Image (cartoon, rainbow, N blue to C red):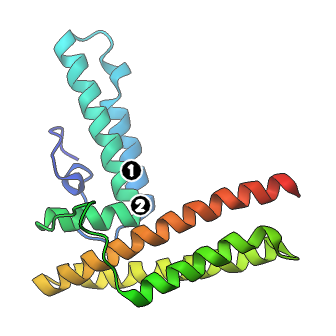
Amino acid sequence: MGSELSRNFFELFDLPVAFRIDRRDLAERYRILQGLTHPDRFASAGDQERRLAVQKAAQVNEAYQILRHPLSRARYLLELQGVEFDGQRDTAVDPEFLMEQMELREALAAIPAAAEPLQEYNALVARLDDSMRKLEARVAELLEQDTDSARAEAKSLVLKMQFMDKLQQEARALEEALLDTH
């Protein structure tokens, strides 16, 4: 790990630019970099050095947060390859997927009224996790290809992953509510 921090987060962590990474290795490299760049190590340094240390530590933290999560890592990889995301225009996904999302949201909304809400919750979460794993696996395959069509399909799947991620977050919030009432 070089002393000069890079703009490319993979280079910063001395990792290959790839979707498939060893998360334990990433966490270990993060701990090392965090120790090297922590502002407390520069408490007796000059103002400019302290400011630079704060900036470096912030970059290490941002890079780690992006690389540790498959969704943000995939998006970051695509952006490195020149794919742009536009939050206003990048919402169109296929109608079949939208119908599935509506059904999943309805199932999530019905859980509190179910006879066995925690059992229903666990079944839905398993389904969400399985869907996300399949999306991640396909994105990984596509990102290993170096073609415009693979990048376009990967972008489409990343947009689907965003939907699934939001649904997973809503499910976690529901879990907290369910556990509070039981």
Residue that sits furthest to the bottom in the current view: 96
Residue at the spot x=69%, y=60% of the render?
174
Amino acid type of disc 2? His
Q: Is residue 147 visible?
A: no
Name the residue carrying label 1: 65
Residue at the spot x=25%, y=75% of the render?
155
Q: Position of residue 17 (x, y in %)?
A: 21, 66
Q: Is residue 146 above or below residue 72?
A: below
Which numbered tag is attached to residue 69? 2
Residue at the spot x=37%, y=46% of the render?
30
Relative to 107, 168 lies left or right? left
Is there CB contact under 8 Å for labels 2 and 1? yes
Choose between 65 and 149: the one closer to the eye.
Answer: 149
Amino acid type of disc 1? Gln
Q: Position of residue 54 (x, y in %)?
A: 29, 26
Q: Quadrant of residue 124?
A: bottom right
Choose between 175 and 111: the one closer to the eye.
Answer: 111
Residue at the spot x=40%, y=58% of the render?
68
